[in-house]
Image: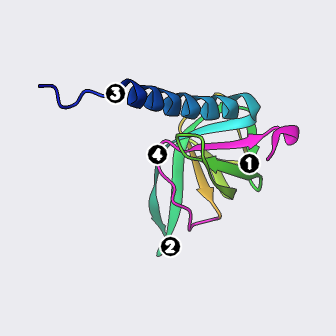
Amino acid sequence: MFGNRLSKEEKSRRRAERQAVYDRVYTLHEQAEFLCYINDAYAEEYKGKSFVKLEGLVAKGTGRVGDTFLLYDCEGRKKAEITMTELYLGTNPVEQLEGGDKRVALYPKEQDVKYQAGDILCKLKPDDNE
């Protein structure tokens, strides 16, 4: 009659998986000294070349051009370490971004990473780095 009913074990397993994802992302928030949510990621043409452009908002901390950032997917799994070559607040180039900044654009040096909306960009506090 109801072919989509899940067993108690399956429900429990799925609930545990969701909790593990929540815990990973929560830990990132707690340990980050800089945290930026990526709302969009796409290729942008400039002088005949294509560059990755990340757009988002800064939730906390300060990030500077040249800093090394950790990139995580939306489930808190580490994807890469990246460096920013340019930062923008709105249309203005800046040397740093700070918590509360909206409409930020970031241009990573590493172009071969699979960036996507929902990614989390952060710097962890020194003692908490892997």
Q: Residues within 10 Å of mark 3 (few under 14, many from 20)?
A: few
N-term-proximal mark, 4 vs 3: 3
Task: Quote the CA–CA distance across marks 4 and 3.
Answer: 33 Å
Identify the image's colour scheme: rainbow, by chain, secondary structure or one colour. Answer: rainbow
Q: In the rendered structure, which segment of residues is drawn in magenta?
A: 110-130
Tell me the residue that label 2 is attached to.
47
Q: Say what secondary structure mark 3 lies in.
A: loop
Q: Is residue 65 above or below residue 99?
A: below
Q: Say what secondary structure mark 2 lies in.
A: loop
Amino acid identity at mark 3: Ser
Amino acid identity at mark 4: Ala
Q: Quadrant of the N terminus?
A: top left
Tags 1 and 2 touching, CB below 8 Å: no
State whether residue 101 appears in this view: no
Tags 2 and 3 touching, CB below 8 Å: no
State whether residue 69 appears in this view: yes
Quarter of the figure with residue 75: top right
Q: Which mark is residue 117?
A: 4
Q: Which of marks 2 and 3 is in front?
A: 3
Q: Which mark is residue 95?
A: 1
N-term-proximal mark, 2 vs 4: 2
- In this view, the residue farthest toward the left is 1
Magenta stretch, overall SS: loop
Q: Which of 1 and 114 is in front in this view?
A: 1
Q: Residue 11 carries which label?
A: none
N-term-proximal mark, 3 vs 1: 3
Tell me the residue that label 3 is attached to.
7
Q: Is residue 38 above or below residue 111?
A: above
